Amino acid sequence: MHRQVDSQASMFRDFSSGSLVLATHPLRGIKRDADAVLGSLSREFEELYAATGRPSMPPEWRVKASLLIALYPIRTDRVSCELE
């Protein structure tokens, strides 16, 4: 079962983390491109999941996390999860 993302960020802080990043920062373009590609693959991802069972982490999150790990000197997946 593919978990649906329910963004409630405004409930926990008065600002968005995106407002802290410059509009011209290179990661914004990379994120936009990654979102476009992963959005086009969404149907294929959805077909891989059963309709029952425990919801999983969206694969889009894992791919984006791996991309950040490749771009920045983060040692492991575990460290990247601790940074969130």
Image: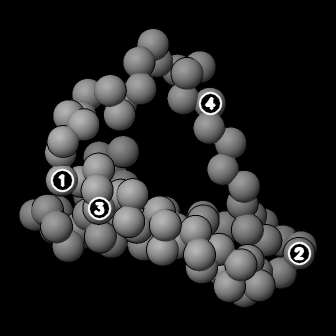
**Which residue corresponds to mark 1?**
26
**Which residue corresponds to mark 4?**
8
Badge nearest the viewer, 2 or 3: 3
Lower position in the chain sequence, tag 2 or tag 1: 1
**Residue 2 found in image quarter:** bottom right
Residue sitting at x 59%, y 79%: 41
Amino acid residing under circle 3: Ile
**Residue 46 found in image quarter:** bottom right
Contact (Cβ within 8 Å) of mark 4 with mark 1: no
Residue 63 appearing in the image: yes
Mark 3 crowdedness (10 Å alpha carbons): few <14, some 14-19, many ≥20: some
Q: CA distance from mark 2 to mark 3?
A: 32 Å
Q: CA distance from mark 2 to mark 1?
A: 38 Å
Amino acid residing under circle 1: Pro
Residue sitting at x 54%, y 29%: 9
Contact (Cβ within 8 Å) of mark 3 with mark 1: yes
Amino acid residing under circle 2: Ala
Q: Determine whether, in the image, residue 58 is placed left or right of residue 69.
A: right
**Which residue corresponds to mark 2?**
51
Q: Quadrant of the C terminus?
A: top left
